[in-house]
Image: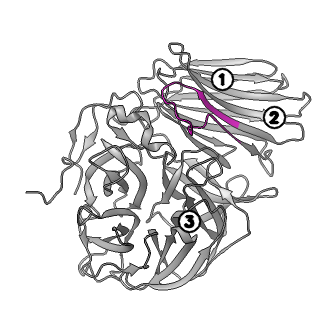
Amino acid sequence: MPPVGSLSEPHEDSWRPQVHFSPPEGFMNDPNGLFVDAQGTYHLYYQYNPTGILAGNQHWGHATSKDLFHWFDQPIAIYPPDAESQVFSGSVVIDVKNTSSFFPDQSDGVVAIYTLNTPGAQVQEIAYSRDGGYTFTPFEGNPVIDGQSTQFRDPKVVWHAETQRWIMVVAYAQEFIVAIYTSPDLKTWTHASDYSHHGLLGLQYECPNLVRVPVRDAVGAPQTEYDMYVLTLSINPGAPLGGSTTQYFPGNFDGTQFTPVDGATRLADFAKDNYAAQFFYGTPEGEDALSLGWASNWQYTEATPTAREGWRGVMTLPRRSFLTRNSREGWVLVSLPVELSPVLCPGPIRVTREHLGGDMRFEADLRAVKSGAYHFEIVLPTFSRTATEARLTFELSSSASGESVSGGWLFALGGDCHFYLDRGRTHGFDHPLFTDGFSTSVVAPGEGDCTWTLSAVFDRSILEVFVNGGAASATMTVFPEGRLTMLAVRTAGIPEDVLVNVVVHGLKSVWEGGRPRSIPRSRVDAT
């Protein structure tokens, strides 16, 4: 079902991101069923309430893209079977070998695996699509797994080539168990092992993912002799910063059991607005894993002010990930945005390579960027600390409203530093759990790298930062009353001979000319 080029009204909402995916209306949370097909079309399904701006009445919304930025809305893909049920999170696979017998005449059949939430239980069901993932038929033999539990959800399924079996990881949420199942045909599942009581527990486990990722060295070169697995696991509520968060465990998987490399708990994000990330199925072997996350937090998502514009929920930037290892922290899952070229405005707004040492200031006027979305990069060579405090900070501000969002490095003696973000000087959203500031400790660059780096994208109501080549990242929603149109970069206590590089780009709105739709968002089989 190729997209038809009809357009809706342009998105002029003051908080609606212009390069991040958001629903046309209603409430959106977890990404579901991410996959890329043989034609290079990316499919995004998502938890969706089409009739309200609060969670509930869960369907699978659907959108498609060729570049992970310009999305075409598709009709709702999966509906609940009755008014008492909801279609919760899950995943999608391509049944190339027709193991399910659903696709006797094709090698591109799509199968969705999801949780059906009913008043009495949560069970795992499957539905198949013979048209590339646009419409689905529920399997007559559902459910395929009945865990005899009201808290049993969010299946992620992958193909394990070595054993020629499908693998499912699924959460027994309040028992703190990730159950691992295997299947030859997506219909009959056998329990293989449990991964339980690992990492941060919070009050429940949700949205596990199992993904094979490449390993790269300290300068990003591939280590082609091997790759590894990563198990991601979200918790809500009970995150260290409050509400919801995602943690990850590097390790090995033998077809039945996941074994972490160590006992460490690693967080995927050092702010509060990145949850339930899912990796795309079908990316080429050996390439970086691709993912999207839900950029919000269950502590306050149902109170955010975008309800005034008729929508709630936004996805993170599409990200690519790989594992690397350093001598201090061990294994680190690096997270970086995919290539931004589809949305970069021609030519940078400003480029500088100058001595910003001492107490200096660099400014870029962003008022000409119609979208209100910007990308900026800062590169700072490592330097010897001679002062008790040195810093490099940035600030996005509005002269009209006096609001600002800021962040940067605070360098300590001894080589390491702290990186912080502050959203407390914006006025559009007041909530007791909408925490103002976040920070993380950052290991000094080394092992082939000698620079501190920052890549950041601000998009009206969301800021994402990637520190030191993605070794640390943060996702932060922010709701200013005025447009933030001035970028300032300041230094203090940095030696005057240090050259600082700053590059600022505007980003093009993916909604210019209106929002592309395939066909109206109404049930396909309605009469």
Per the image, label 3 sits on a secondary structure element best described as: loop
Q: Nearer the viewer, residue 307 or 366?
A: 307
Q: Quadrant of residue 77?
A: bottom left
Looking at the image, which residue is at 90% across and 29% down?
Answer: 388
**Residues tagged 2 and 3 counted as in contact (Cβ below 8 A):** no
Where are the magenta residues, as a range? 420-439
List the residue tagged with mark 3: 286
In percent of width and height, residue 296 lies at 49, 45
Q: Earlier in the sequence, mark 1 or mark 2?
A: 1
Q: How far is the residue under mark 3 from the one under mark 1?
A: 36 Å
In percent of width and height, residue 406 lies at 63, 28
Q: Nearer the viewer, mark 1 or mark 2?
A: 2
| Picture layout, residue 94 above or below residue 523 | below
| Picture layout, residue 281 above or below residue 480 | below
**Residues tagged 1 and 2 counted as in contact (Cβ below 8 A):** no
List the residue tagged with mark 1: 352
**Residue at far left of view:** 527
Q: Nearer the viewer, mark 2 or mark 3?
A: 2
In percent of width and height, residue 455 lies at 61, 38
